[in-house]
Image: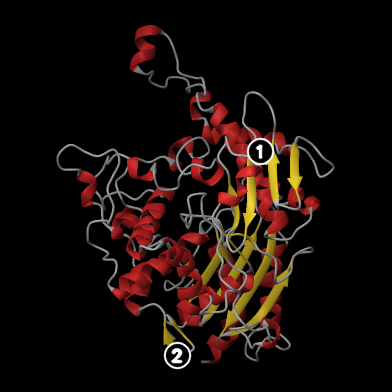
């Protein structure tokens, strides 16, 4: 019954045309003239293909990236899907354990969707017309792992922490209460996997759900966007990219005469204010748009470059995966070399700050899907938050400039009427929230992936989840609960 309810909710969200108009609602011109209504979901076969592709990616990464059991994958990773194919006991799917690949479905109407693990990258979705015989042509990252045993390297470069304890002056009971608030959810849809709290560079609280530990990788969803903007910022700091210059690629299809899309800048993309036609938030995210590259093997950049301009860039905010993917494509072009591009995140960021357990996935064409497809654990995300908490410096080396941190924390101009809640691929405290410090900012990803940075309290909070259905975990309320443990310290000052 629970899955059926979620299926109906999803149908209502992605297929608004299936819902009859409310009484008195004005009919379209076509309906007025003919009495006909456009109710049929013309994308239903695409949606089914994408649903199978999602299951292929979730199962593949659950088994071979996260090293979870098939039972765990069905209970948590696949809970996001209204009607997954099969059960842990079997069904219309194939797992190739030797090739670390999965195939979902096999009928004459909807293609079988396949995904395969690739070294250094994670799982990649194949095109509908590809089979396991095509795996050797998929990208791989052949870069040796970072040297050293993290268990013998002191935190934050490694995982050696000694006994984790709450420092004097911080209310341990209040901190535990905040942890319980995060884990003991009243909503059946909110499934907290981990909570990690870092204060003054030290881990002061770390908690995991059963079946999860500090090595468990799960999908970041859109928290990946904040990792992507960090890499892009490094290139801006170097002068390879310019926030306000024309983008270094051609648009599709090629325009005759001046193409108005040439007025879109990197700043517009990172502020989610490109002015391009909206796909992901028009009920088609799981039918066309970026969903085709996430879950169906299409290029993550070709269709993004084909969107038409419908508003003046910078004047309207709309959360769109394609804006991020276009910015990442600009990053690829200025790097130039394919091998250097694949190695850039490891060499420039991940290895520098000890993010050993993080995999940045690509599409089958070798383009990073840094709008969503990153797999990592809580400790690596805490390291990422610490880089920002430390002003962009790690072990005395500046990795990102203070100017870039200021950019990602500055409200996008087009969000002024929405409460100034978004900056440059980071989320900001909305104007109407007064129970957390205004200097806080965070990453945010579907299913409850948050890294909250609170500079005024030298605090980084990481919450990982596998939420599903209605979701709704509130990171700012979580931050409020954690900050209650610091009230005694503040009163003492």
Q: Earlier in the sequence, mark 2 or mark 1?
A: 1
> In this picture, is 330 found above or below 89?
below
Q: Nearer the viewer, residue 42 or 297?
A: 297
> Residue 385, can we see it?
yes
Horizontal side, residue 103 vs residue 30: left or right: right
Residue 50: x and y in percent read: 58, 37
Query: Which residue position holds label 2?
Result: 396
Quadrant in the rendering for residue 280: top left
Write the residue at 49% across / 19% down: 39
Residue 104: x and y in percent read: 69, 38
Q: Nearer the viewer, residue 342 or 260?
A: 342
Front disc: 2 or 1? 2
Horizontal side, residue 143 vs residue 290: left or right: right
Dot 2 crowding, Cα within 10 Å, few <14, some 14–19, many 20+: few
Image quarter (top left, top right, bottom left or bottom right) of the N terminus: top right
Q: Nearer the viewer, residue 464 or 470?
A: 464
Q: Secondary structure at mark 1?
A: helix
Residue 403: x and y in percent read: 32, 76
Q: In this figure, which colouring scheme has been used for the structure?
A: secondary structure
Write the residue at 68% across / 51% down: 60
Query: Which residue position holds label 1?
Result: 6
> Which residue sits furthest left?
257
C-alpha separation, residue under disc 2 versus residue under disc 1:
49 Å
Q: Secondary structure at mark 2?
A: loop
Which disc number belongs to residue 430?
A: none
**Count of numbered circles on the image:** 2
> Which residue sits furthest top?
34
> Residue 413, can we see it?
no
> In this picture, is 426 found above or below 164?
above
> In this picture, is 469 found above or below 176?
above
């Amino acid at each position: 019954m629970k899955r059926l309810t979620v299926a109906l909710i999803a149908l209502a969200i992605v297929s608004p045309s299936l819902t009859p108009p409310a009484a008195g609602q004005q009919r379209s011109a076509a309906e007025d003239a003919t009495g006909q209504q456009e109710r049929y979901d013309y994308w239903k076969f695409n949606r089914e293909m994408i649903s199978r592709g999602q299951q292929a990616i979730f199962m593949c990464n659950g088994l071979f990236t996260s090293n979870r059991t098939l039972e765990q994958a069905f209970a948590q990773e696949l809970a996001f899907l209204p009607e997954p194919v099969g059960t842990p006991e079997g069904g219309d799917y194939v797992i190739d354990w030797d090739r670390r690949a999965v195939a979902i479905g096999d009928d004459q109407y909807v293609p079988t969707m396949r995904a395969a693990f690739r070294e250094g990258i994670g799982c990649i979705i194949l095109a509908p017309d590809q089979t396991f015989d095509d795996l050797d042509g998929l990208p791989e990252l052949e870069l040796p792992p970072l040297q050293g045993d993290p268990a013998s390297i002191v935190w934050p470069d490694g995982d050696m922490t000694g006994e984790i304890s709450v420092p004097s002056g911080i209310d341990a009971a209040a901190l535990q209460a905040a942890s319980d608030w995060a884990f003991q959810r009243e909503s059946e849809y909110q499934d907290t996997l981990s909570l990690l709290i870092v204060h003054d560079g030290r881990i002061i609280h770390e908690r995991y759900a059963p079946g999860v530990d500090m090595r468990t990788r799960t999908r970041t969803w859109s928290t990946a966007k904040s990792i992507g903007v960090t890499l892009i910022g490094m290139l801006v700091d170097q002068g390879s990219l310019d926030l306000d210059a024309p983008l270094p690629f051609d648009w599709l299809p090629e325009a005759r005469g001046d193409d108005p899309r040439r007025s879109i800048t990197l700043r517009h993309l990172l502020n989610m204010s490109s002015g391009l036609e909206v796909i992901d938030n028009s009920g088609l995210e799981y039918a066309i748009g970026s969903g085709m590259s996430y879950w169906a093997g299409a290029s993550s950049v070709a269709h993004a470059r084909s969107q038409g301009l419908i508003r003046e860039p910078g004047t309207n905010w709309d959360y769109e995966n394609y804006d991020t993917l276009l910015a990442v494509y600009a990053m690829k072009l200025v790097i130039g070399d394919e091998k250097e591009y694949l190695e850039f995140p490891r060499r420039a960021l991940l290895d520098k700050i000890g993010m050993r357990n993080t995999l940045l996935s690509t599409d089958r064409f070798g383009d990073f899907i840094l709008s969503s497809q990153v797999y990592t654990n809580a400790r690596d995300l805490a390291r990422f938050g610490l880089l920002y908490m430390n002003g962009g410096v790690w072990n005395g080396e500046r990795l990102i400039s203070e100017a870039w941190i200021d950019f990602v924390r500055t409200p996008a101009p087009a969000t002024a009427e929405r409460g100034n809640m978004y900056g440059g691929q980071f989320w900001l405290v909305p104007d109407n929230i007064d129970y957390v410090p205004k200097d806080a900012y965070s990453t945010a990803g579907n299913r409850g992936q948050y890294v909250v940075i609170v500079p005024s309290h030298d605090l980084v909070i990481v919450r990982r989840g596998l939420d599903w259905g209605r979701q709704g975990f509130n990171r700012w309320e979580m931050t409020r609960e954690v900050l209650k443990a610091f009230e005694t310290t503040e009163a003492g000052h």
